[in-house]
Image: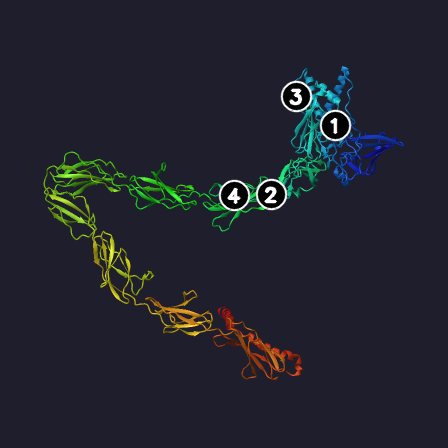
Amino acid sequence: MFEGITKEMQTSVILVQVNPGEAFTIRREDGQFQCITGPAQVPMMSPNGSVPPIYVPPGYVSQIIEENGVRRVLVIPQQPEFHPGGHSPLHHPPPPPHAHMPAFIPHPAMMPPPTHLYTGMAGGVGDMSSQYISQYHPAHIYSEQDSHSQHGRPAFVHRDDRTSKTYERLQKKLKERQGVGGGGGQVKDSPPPSPQKTCSSPPTVDIHNGVGGKGLETEQGQFSHAVAGPDRQTGRGKNGETAELDEESQALQALLSTISKPVVSIHFCCLISFDLFSNSILMFFCDSVSTNVDENFYEVSISITGKDGKYKNVYRGEELSATLEDLRPATDYHVRVQAMCNCLQGSPSEAVSFTTLSCEPDPPNPPRKASGTKNSLLLQWKPPCDNGSKIQNYIVQWDEGKGTGIYEQCYYGPLKQYKMTKLSPASRYAFRVAAKNDMGVSEFSEVVDLFTSYSVPLPPFPPELEMAGVTWLCLKWQRPSSSPKEDDISYILEMEEEGSGYGFQPSYDGDELSCTIKNLHRSTKYKFRVAAYNSEGKSNPSQVVEFITKPDRPSSPCRPVIRGRVLPNSFKLTWEPPKDNGGAEVTKYVVELSEGLSGLSWELVYSGPAMEHMCEGLKPGCSYQTRVYCMSEGGQSPVSHSTLQVQTPAVPPGPCHPPRLVGKPKAREVQLRWGPPQVDGGSPVSCYSVEVSGPQSEDSREVYQGPDLDCSVAGLMPGKPYSFRLKAANKAGFGPLSERCEVTTGPGNTYMHYRLEWGAAEGSMQLCYSGPGVNHEMKGLLPATNYFCRVQAVNVAGVGSFSEAVLCQTPCSVPAAVSNIYSMKDSRSAPLYSPSTCLGISWESPCDHGSEITSYLIDLGERQPVVVGPVTKYIIQNLQPDTSYRIRIQALNSLGAGPFSHTFKLKTKPLPPQPPRLECTAFSHQTLRLKWGDGPAKAATSDALQYQLQMGDRSGRFISVYKGPCHTHKVQRLNESTSYTFRIQAFNEAGEGPFSNVYTFTTPRSPPAPVKAPKVERLDDTSCEVTWEALPPMKGDPVIYTLQCMMGNSEFKQAYKGSATSFHVQNLQPNSDYRFRVCAIRQCQDTPELSGPYSPTVTLSPQRNDMATGGSATGSGSKASTESNRARRSLTDEQCAFLLLMVFAVIAILIAFVIQYFVIK
């Protein structure tokens, strides 16, 4: 609250008292706003000494109290229960919405406007003290923070010159009409412009729940020059009058465009107020256009996408205020108003931003059960929309499980979950929830019934197969019969793939009673079991069931191929099974055949499980296409990728009709003619052949061959009967002969004799017979050879022409003799081949003389001949070693045996050598040196006789340890006191001999390892103590030690023998040198003791005189340690060899460097 204090003076000073926790906003002379927070007193000048009007928000009243000449204006609330400021918001309810607001601008239509505005909230939130901001609540009235005229309208916006002149002319014409007409009452003149007119247009304030925005935006007033409606453009009198009406319409439109920004007052709806300049001007325009003020109306549009966004009309009417309802709480809106009069429409006003008030939250969704047990439920809920005020607490109510509809509060707090405990098992409880913020409590959500858990469910029945696919199985199962419907039961479906070895793996976890398992293998057996569980635990799994996925359809078979020859009427097809059978065996194959190469029609010719088929009933010389597909349990496969094209061979044509005689026969010539055969055999007829048989012989001869359908046969005998037969030929050959055609030649002269020419080639025939005979026998011909012959007739009339050459082939005969026989060099690779008892021979195949060679006869002299098949090499077995054989070969065919070949002499090898005697010449605990035979220890690899030594392993098998010509071998890396078995074999070019008897050799026991140099410590002048390192027992045999001592240059004598590792030597002479060494002895149970090598010698020097007492203590020890160090520094053989190698390498590098530098350069 605030108090205004006035003082009666000519020029009064008004003191505005601002109480603590309140703010007072003023406008300074430079136009800026200043916010002053209380407690403070603000002095203000009043030029006429009157108290300015104090505007109070709704629910408050102002009261003037005069005390001691001082008038005080109190702003107090109407409610008697209101308590002014000073209450903490943490312990008391928040104050009324306007309890802390200093003053507000009223709605223009509700109260008269003030002369000046003293207070406001334009300073924004940033100008107020932070300690009071949290106590303020949204105001209900929003207004612009600029100066107003005395009539309550905003300052006139900026106009251009043309509009101003039109406005003045209209004012003048209005006065003249009033004076002439003597009509109406006094019209109010337009008020003078506001003092702020020269400044920028009134700022737009972005108001959010009663608190001003952060800045003021400058509005740019512009006039909208719109064209008047059609009724205004048509004149009613003179042209001048019509022009004046147009100007009046433009002026009226400009006036409509000067509508002020609306004033917003927010409750739970939005109240918007607006106004024009004045009633007088509006009445003037209305009178000039034959209308009145009641015809004006306004449009209010609103936007939620920004000032420049899309606006939606929400009100249209004549009232100067509008109430907008159904707005969203805590939402930014932008509103503007537009004035209209008849057909004229002004420009929209500048948009005003406001934010609706916050309110109680929306009702939340019902709580859900997050988890639960027999005696508890965990409730969870989602926060609803807070409607601009943060949700502080939630209220959860329940019916305590009684089901009476009466609810009690069980939780109040800010969390979004709550756990109810101490509940009854398997019981129903009803819950509902509400949200609360600073504005109030929301409505309760819908009631939800939740149940506590039951006991662990029983094992469900095994799952059942609903549907099966290639890669999926759809299973279903039933809810355990003992579990009530209210119990939340989930299920785990476990699966095991056959042969995977992973056992049962979970494949589904949920509350559904069916599941589809995907990504499985085709035609595979899977095991399933299901288990049920609730919050109390998991049941035992059901019985295991097995289901198998369906097989997939197989892939296409391989392209069919031809097996054997293609016959004119049939061919045989074979094909391979598909590479992928889809997981099931192929049940049958289907073969389809298409005649021609078009592939338009296919005929099924085979269906069955076989993978071959004989296609029969085909046409000769015709093209066919074949394709194959298969079928299995998974379905039908695609057809083979490519079809097989088959061309059946053509056959010789069918028989022709007998040739017919053309004209009369001549003495030595007749003319014949014929037609083509009815069946061409699948290939066009290429030629015809005419044969004739004479009167004296039934043998026929060919007299014509060619493509023509007629011929002239010459060279006949006059007056003789002849028979003619015809046959046709295509690319497959000649067909059968036709029926005979009997023709008798005409009379003529007789023949004298004949000439016969014979030769192996058609162009090089020679005369071989001349005489009256009509036959001749040729001798000395080669079998299965082609010969050509022709004949010529000679009579008294002259020499006739030669006949056509005739091809004659001699019959087949027995094969020719085998020409060459060879000894096989690579016959060792043959199984069961022994050069001592076997001979490998090969030969060249002779000429078969027209008949294929069926076998060969190998003659070995005194032995029984050997008959072999049609091969060109053979191994003769079961022969005598070191024996010579005479071999000859004879070829045979179906006609008989050919002549023998020349004799070929071969000799078998002697027998392989016998194994030598094996003996052991040297041995140790890790090596055995073996020797056999008589000869040097080392021999060349080119020696004919070689040996193979084998040693037996623990499993009784023999492994080769040496193979070569040497007579000795050293076997290393053996174990001590172990028996080993050996055998030996000799071999040469004759082969491998037998193995010897098994020899057994045993390695001796190994002696102990050398002991390191002992340590000697002098105790006094006549005694010392010798210590040495202990050795572990050797395979259970104990180890003892022998200590030897030597004084001066005498011999070593034994000082101690036993198992101890130290010995106290006494009775030493003070001025003598002593040397000590230790030897380890292995005490064997069944053999004598084995002594190892002695350790390095350690020397004990005598003590010096007393002058070197300081060093005497260390002298003997130093000597002994020096001797020991020398012993340790002794290099091994390998180290010495490596050192020598490095020295020689360095010397070689130096020599090479010297040669390079001094000799070459």
Find disc 2 in the rendering and name its residue: 454
- Whole-Å distance between the Cαs marked 4 and 2? 19 Å
Q: Residues within 10 Å of mark 1 (few under 14, many from 20)?
A: many
Q: Earlier in the sequence, mark 3 or mark 1?
A: 1
Residue 219 spot, x, y in % from top left:
71, 32
Residue 569 spot, x, y in % from top left:
29, 41
Mark 2: amino acid: Tyr
> Secondary structure under badge 3?
loop
Mark 4: amino acid: Phe
Q: Nearer the viewer, mark 4 or mark 1?
A: 4
Name the side, left or right, on which 558 lies relative to 805.
right
- Whole-Å distance between the Cαs marked 4 and 3? 86 Å
Q: Residue 277 occupies which quadrant of the picture?
A: top right
Q: Residue furthest front?
A: 482
In the drawing, what numbered circle is on residue 229?
Answer: 3
Q: Earlier in the sequence, mark 2 or mark 3?
A: 3
Q: Earlier in the sequence, mark 4 or mark 1?
A: 1
Placement of 822 over or under 47, stated as above or below: below
- Whole-Å distance between the Cαs marked 3 and 1? 26 Å
Mark 3: amino acid: Gly
Find disc 4 in the rendering and name its residue: 461
Q: Residue 817 occupies which quadrant of the picture?
A: bottom left
Find disc 1 in the rendering and name its residue: 156
- Whole-Å distance between the Cαs marked 2 and 1? 80 Å
In the drawing, what numbered circle is on residue 975?
Answer: none
Q: Pointers 4 and 3 in contact (CB under 8 A)?
A: no
- Whole-Å distance between the Cαs marked 2 and 3? 81 Å
Nearest the eye: 460 or 215: 460
